[in-house]
Amino acid sequence: MLKCSVGLLALSSLFLSGAAIAQEKIKVGVTATLEGTYTVLGEDGIRGHQTALNVLGKKVGDKELEFIIASTDATPDSAVRAVRKLIEQDKVQILLSPLSGDEGIAVKNFAKTHPELTFINAASGAQETTYVDPAPNFFRYNMDGAQWQVGLGKYAYDEKKYRKIATVGEDYSFIYTQVFGLVLEFCGAGGQVTNRQWVPLGTKDFASVIAALPDDVDAIYLGLGGADAVNFLNQYQQAGGKAHLMGGSIMIDQTILSSKGNAKNALIGTIAASGQADTWEDPGWQKFVKAYQDAFPPNKRFPSPSLLATNYYDSTMALILALRQVNGDLSNNQAKYKEALAKIEIDAPNGKIKLDSNRQAIGTNFVTEVVDDGKGALFSKVVKVIPNVNQTLGYDPAVFAKIGLPSRTVPECKKY
Amino acid sequence: MTRFIERHPAWALIVIIAVAVALWLIFAVWPPGLEEAVGRKRVFLNAVFNGITLGGLYFLVASGFTLIFGLMRNVNLAHGSLYLFGGYVGYAISASTGSWVLSFIVAFVLTALVGVLLQVLVFRRMEGQDLRQTMVTIGLSIVFADLMLWACGGDFYQIQTPNWLIGPIELPLLTAVKSSGEPVYLRYPLVRLVIFLASVAIGIAMWLALNRTRIGMIIRAGVDDRDILAATGVRIQVVFVLVFALGAGLAGIAGVVGGTFQSLSPGEDIRFLLASLVVVIVGGMGSIPGAALGALIIGLAEQLGSVYIPTYAIVVTFLIMVLVLALRPQGLLARR
């Protein structure tokens, strides 16, 4: 009996001391896709996160930020598992999570079960995450997939004179959102989307998908990312594909443009749209690129930060700056901190970002074209910069709500 | 063959009709009604060819797996790691020397060497303890996966296809006839055909080696009863090492093939382990012709599924496995 109570006492004092230490530090949990198809994206996201820490420092008043990184594989259950582990085992108070679309929807729903904590989206871009039943403690400082396509449809129709296109995309929420943005604008301008093919995330053998591509279209839109995109391009080259291409935001990105081998050369001249452009002249962007390049040796990074690095940089920046505004005060279920996060406007490298009433970013979008720098490296060159893109893409909210949620077949190809 | 027809006339009839329909689908020009119902012939032909070539790759991985199991009753769950290791070695060689053919040779030799080490250092110590060996291979596969992640990172690698293999070639198969009467032939990536032919060649060589040589005879005897074989004075341990080296080397070659027409990244080891498990379960554990048949079925199911029922494509493979397990649990071509 005595032994038992002494043991209990020792155990509880251990827990108490653990809590005492936790108070001097602010623990932040970070998740990234460090496994599976999107490994490369997750790795560069973490590089962006570290660049932000290099620039901003880890001190908030007299408190020190401590970051704990957990790995996911782009599936929703892996994200929830990682977040739960960070909360329950590591006792984090703030989360910077997750990276991928389906993960985002799952983590947003999970966030509702922990209303006392704060969730800052790291990079995920499904529309549903903040558009349908948003969680009051979930903040997203990057635009969604549809916002990232703004400008592309019109540019393809007006400048490139494409009239009929077909799409190939990974079968999950983020790519649905990207195709949603593209179709809305391209069909709104008068174009036609004749065929939408969906492939499972993690597809290795695209040969049959490539064979099924229609040949009576002006261009083919690719909504693929990570290993899938590289596999597709490689097999596309082997099949002798020659069509004009258009790219989604993680397709025309350094994660693909700097992959090994020469299959990526099929992308030269491809038009795309994204939340960033590699060769933007803006001094803030150039400063960020420099900070990213200085933080890692050339063989451990891309020539220029990917969209994921930028997103992780921006969200880490919002996390730290808002925390400094309230001087690290996380009392009263982090009420003050959440208020600061909702109001903060950050001067991000890829343009100013503020949040709407759903805590979803309003930001700047870029239409780009892939160019060869003459030394074999590919970059996305700015064609057009579009500021103040909101989640309803400039539509009246009532009209936008009637279009429906992004899915395999929504939106229809017509003018709304 | 004739015996099969005599014994199961109804089944034989069904098989003959199915083969005839398949041949007609491949060689005839499709009538417009059919094209409307199931899509263009080009797509169908491509899916069939892709299925067959993918089956070739699966056969390379699974044949080593099934060979090792057949002789040593060792379910080597680290087989996928050997595949990935071979792929990485192949990439390193082809990137540094620029020679695609050399990368096959080096990958084969190095993975075979790893196989020898595994057999000598690990499996010999726990011979006959099937469960323990299986558990150890699971552990090894996790260790290997982490070591490779540490050495090569999470990046995806692609082995450069040599220039003479890039691009499509025209096959003498009609896909359509244009309105002007001009025939349109199937264009197909050359590299996949070459790889498929190579895997057929390897399969035939293996069959010949097993059925026409002395060492093959020893291995077949070992598969049937290894205790009696050992009692006849054959140095069974040497045979074990040799077979393990061959099986591992084949996985290494498959890694180079997979790295050429797909890509290499962490997680591929598990994917190919799973694929070869499904292939040998369908074909019959320990049987080389079974591995060939299983690989063909799974490859075709994956590719045709991804074109005609994309939503359920992943399920089809496992559905086939479930059906085989329910109706013929020993596998389609198993002897016992």
Image (cartoon, rainbow, N blue to C red):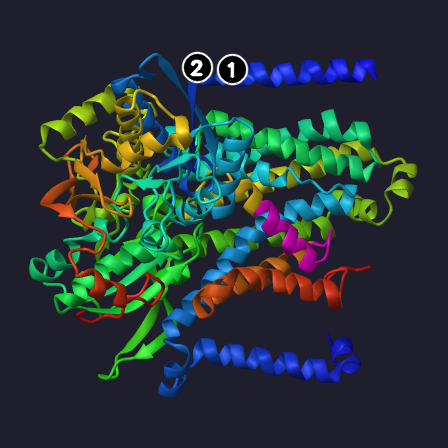
- Residue B25 in view, yes or no: yes
Quadrant for the C terminus of chain B, please: bottom right
**Percent position (x, y) of residue A39?**
42, 37
Query: Mark 1 = which residue?
Result: A20
Query: Mark 2 = which residue?
Result: A24
Task: Tell me the CA gap for discs 1 and 2.
Answer: 7 Å
Q: Nearer the viewer, residue B91 or A402?
A: A402
- Pointers 1 and 2 in contact (CB under 8 A)? yes
- Disc 1 is attached to a residue of which chain? A
Q: Is residue B278 magenta?
A: yes
Is residue B50 shown left or right of residue A297?
right
User: The residue under label 2 is which amino acid type?
Assistant: Glu
Label 1: few (<14), some (14–19) or many (≥20) C-alpha neighbours in 10 Å: few
Q: Residue furthest left?
A: A159
**Percent position (x, y) of residue A117?**
43, 34
Q: Which residue range is magenta in the image?
A: B272-287
